[in-house]
Structures are given as C-alpha cells and as structure tokens.
Image (tube, grey):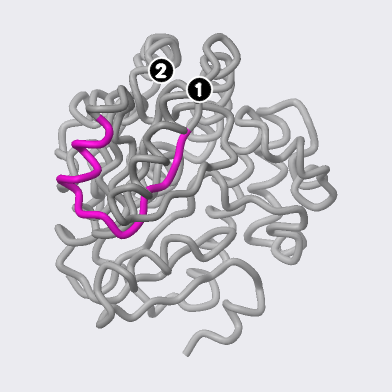
Amino acid sequence: MNRIALFAGQGAQFVGMGADLMPLPETASLFAKASEILGYDLAALCREGPIEAITASDKCQPAIFVVSAACYTAFKARHPEVTFDGCAGLSLGEWTALWAAGVVSFEDAVRILAARGKFMQEACDERPSGMASILSLPAEKVAEIAADCGVFVSNINSQAQINVAGEKEKVDKAVAAAFAAGGKAIVLNVAGAFHSPFMQPARDKLAPVLEGIAFSAPKIPVFSNATGAEHSADPSEIKARMLEQITGTVRWLDCILASGAHEFVEFGPGKVLSGLARRIDKQNKVANIQDAAAIAAWA
C-alpha cells in the first residue's frame, strides 16, 4: 500500500471546524443531511460552538464525522487523480473510514455516531471514570503498571504513547507509577474511561442499532482498531469488531504498521493522527486536510 487516508477521532474538535467547507456545493448537502437526521443545525454548532456543546460525546461524534467526511469529499472533488490504497480512523474515526470505503452510507453513519456518542456519554455519567496517557515507557511496562493499579490499557497509539483507563483514583495511581518508572504521564480531559470495560453499557445499547443497518464489503482495505489488522469483507464480522472497539484496546500502532504504507493523509480537525504516524516512523510522509486552504495547497 502506498497512501492511506486517516480520519480524526474524538478530542480533535474545535469551534469553527469545517466552517470554510460548508458553502461548497459538494459539501453543503452533507451538513444539511446531517442536520435533518440529528434534529439540530450541525453547521451552526460546528461554526459557533460553544466548545462545551461540541465536546459532549453525543454532539462531538457526529460533528467530527461530518467535518471529516466534508474534508474528504471536498478533497476528492478538487483532486480526483489522488487515490488511496486503504484507510483507518481512530475510535469514532473508524466509522468515517468505513463510510469512505463504502461499508456504510453517510446517513447511517450519522445515525450510528449520534447513538454511539449518546450511549458512551450515558456510560460515563453512570460510572465516573477517566484516562491518562503514559509516555516514554515500553508497552510491557505500561501493561505491568495497568495490572498493578487496576486500570485498563485503552489505546496503543505509538511505541511511546499508551493510554490507560479506569476509576479516576486508580488512573492517578497509574500516573504516579509511570513517573516512578522513569516515564511521563498526562491525565486526559475526557468524560470517562473510553475503550475499556467501563463502556460495556454503551456496547450493549449499540448492538441492536447496528443490527438494523445494512453493511457492505469494503471497497478498499480498512484497518480495525480492535485487531490492528485489516477488516474482513464479511459485514457481520465488521459489525462485531466495531462493537468490540467500544470496550477493547485501540491498537492504532498496529493499524499503521499493518498498512505497510509510508504516506498518510489525515482528514478532519486537528493533526493528532498525522503526528502519531510520524512518531511511529520518522520516514513516514504525512499531510493534514482540515480546511479549504489545505485542499488548495495540495501538491
């Protein structure tokens, strides 16, 4: 594989994201369709905020999906000669990747992410929890710290960035243990312990939603957060992996390595994924498409 499309996850949101794409003829309809499905003006929410509203999971997840889809759509309209050999997305971004690969329709992805965000926020509200990012320690040491402190490894983002999740007091204990072991750690400003067993209620609620939605085989390879490998062509297997993703470890490092690619283009707000791709391998070529200026500047 030569070039992989990456799609942003939760935490990349900011007020004004996607604003300059909203008037474009090829993307205006996306915001209009999403607003009709969601029952509120998504374009206005992305454009004007407030940030607290965009950050709530039930609003954040469909908002980042639509902005990322708009970035990808506008880019493809401007640069039809550019092709992608596969795609991947972090957490909710994996749904954007499935949409880009033709597995789910745009409308169904909006419905899924509205429900997913709502259910995950409810799980956070029901059982307070948190996350931290542990830096500069090998995966084996982080796993040891997680086991000792009673937290879960939630994200393996790169060789030197691994997130843990669990009860807030136990997350704080893991942070202290990371510093004691010679590493670093940052408590993340998130609503709860995503990608851990704390999200089991959300997984249970999402399962019947997915049952009622038609999935197709991917037109290009999509890499699974749950396995770190390419998704199956079997739609029922894809649904199963996407449910596992809610409560299991996100194996982002494995996704990037399994692609075999050395060129990555991130679509959507922020530059988190392109930054991770460079940290995974300094030889990787990366770009970020989050606005009309970046699309125009593509060379």
- Look at the image and say whether residue 144 sits in the magenta stretch: yes
Q: Name the residue: 60% across, 31% down.
A: 57
The kind of residue tagged 2 is Phe
Q: Is residue 24 left or right of residue 258?
A: right
Q: Is residue 118 above or below residue 133?
A: above
- Looking at the image, is mark 1 or mark 2 earlier in the sequence? 1
Tag 2 residue: 198
Q: Quadrant of the N terminus?
A: bottom left
Q: Is residue 141 left or right of residue 285?
A: left
Q: Name the residue: 64% across, 50% down.
A: 13
Regarding residue 278, the answer to whether it shows in the image is yes
Regarding residue 87, the answer to whether it shows in the image is no
The kind of residue tagged 1 is Ser
Q: Which residues are magenta?
A: 131-146
Tag 1 residue: 129
Q: Is residue 99 above or below residue 70?
A: above
**Based on the displayed image, in which of its 4 quarters is residue 78 positioned?**
bottom right
Question: Picture coordinates of residue 122 (x, y %)?
Answer: 57, 14
Question: Picture coordinates of residue 38 (x, y %)?
Answer: 68, 28
- Look at the image and say whether residue 17 sits in the magenta stretch: no
Q: Are marks 1 and 2 in contact (CB under 8 Å)?
A: yes
| Residue at the extreme front of the image, as rendered | 180
**Based on the displayed image, in which of its 4 quarters is residue 198 positioned?**
top left
Q: Is residue 133 above or below residue 78?
A: above
Question: Picture coordinates of residue 264 (x, y %)?
Answer: 34, 71
SS at badge 2: helix
Q: Nearer the viewer, mark 1 or mark 2?
A: 1
**Based on the displayed image, in which of its 4 quarters is residue 224 positioned?**
top left
Q: Which mark is residue 76?
A: none
Instruction: Say which of 296 and 194 sits in front.
Output: 194
